[in-house]
Amino acid sequence: MKLWKTSWRFLSLSLLVFFLSGCLGETNLTALDPKGPQSEWLFDNMLLSLYVMAFVTIVVFAIFFIILAKFRRQPGDDEIPKQVHGNTALEITWTVIPIILLTILAVPTITGTFMLADMEPDPEVGEDTLYIKVTGHQFWWQFDYEDEEFTAGNDVYIPVGEKVIFELHAQDVIHSFWVPALGGKVDTIPGITNHLWLEASEPGIYKGKCAELCGASHALMDFKVIALERDDYDAWVAGMQAEEVEPTDTVAQQGREVFEEQSCIGCHAVGGMGTAAGPALTDFANRETLGNYLENNDENLEAWIRDAEALKQGAVMPAYPESELNDEDMEALIAYLRSLSID
């Protein structure tokens, strides 16, 4: 009885975990709701594999229960059953059927592999096909639009309905670039260049993840793919390429001076100025999150500037306690960062 109770508790817990695993807390963060040709192919082949496995399971269990019922040993039956070892028909049957099932899976898999590996430019766009260089850092993503000559951090913008080719690199350790709603995952490896293409079928914000354990803050290494109609995308590109506009607000102007005095520009590019040692801040005011997970509000922003490592383990941004950055300068710096918008 004690063993039965223990087993029942384990079964209940297993069922709970099973049902919770199907819960989706965020939109556009699942491969089960494809929003692009890559993800649609992956989803269709996942279903095909599921149907084949379900067919095999049903047939095997059906035969098992039929044999169990029909050929079970009867009371007083001591005869040895008829032996079918070496039956040619059975041997051919259970050899041919798996070959057919494997062929059903192999044909779309092979054709899809070539489709996913096709890095040729979009024939409808031609030379205007968008190429984006991706670099994985501990623990953020850098997106270089080299043809357009600007960089972005953690949020990557693409035009809807167009093939976008990503060139994947890693600065430190192995990461893995994955946008579940748009396609499969590909590793970013130091010293090795990999490629991936994605296409969004409709406008929206698609959540991305690092799918390779890369350190203490791996779980917080998120990013967003923001798909816009071509006109909106071109307007965004023009805004990112434009030179920084001097803030008109007096406090924001003071904050810009603080930004330069504290050497923030040495790590964060603004309007084409600065480096990409840290995420670019050109359109910072329009970002939804800080450090890929905190809500982008003044309270979190101040806490991040004061001590980023306390909020995201492994963050290399230096801390700015009150002894180095007083409250007045902090207020001015936040005002300046809030002015960084391309709208």
Image (cartoon, rainbow, N blue to C red):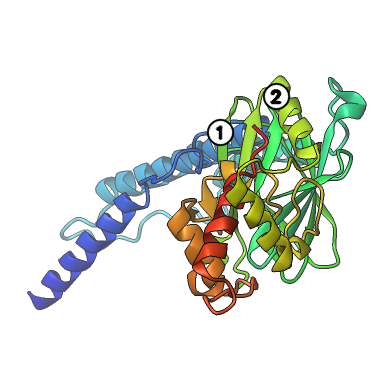
Q: Secondary structure at mark 1?
A: loop
- Work out whether 231 lies above or below 134: above
Disc 2: CA contacts within 10 A as few (<14), some (14-19) or many (>=20)? some
Q: Is 159 in front, or is 33?
A: 159
Q: Quadrant of residue 107?
A: top right
Q: Which amino acid type is shown beneath numbered disc 1?
A: Pro
Residue 82: x percent and y percent? 40, 53
Which residue lies at the image location 19% right of the left edge and 55% below the top edge?
A: 74
Quadrant of the image containing the C terminus = top right
Residue at the front extreme, as displayed: 250
| Kind of residue at badge 2 | Gly
**Alpha carbon separation for disc pair 2 and 1:** 14 Å
Q: Which residue is mark 2?
A: 161
Where does residue 280 sit, x and y in percent of width and height?
Answer: 71, 53
Q: Secondary structure at mark 2?
A: loop
* Residue occupying the point 55% across, 79% down: 323
- Which is more toward the observer, 268 or 145? 268
In the image as oriented, which residue stretches furthest toward the bottom?
A: 323
Q: Which residue is mark 1?
A: 34
Residue 261 place in picture, x, y as percent: 72, 67
Work out whether mark 2 precedes mark 1 in sequence or the reverse, and give the earlier one. Answer: 1
Q: Residue at x 85, y 63 (%)?
A: 192
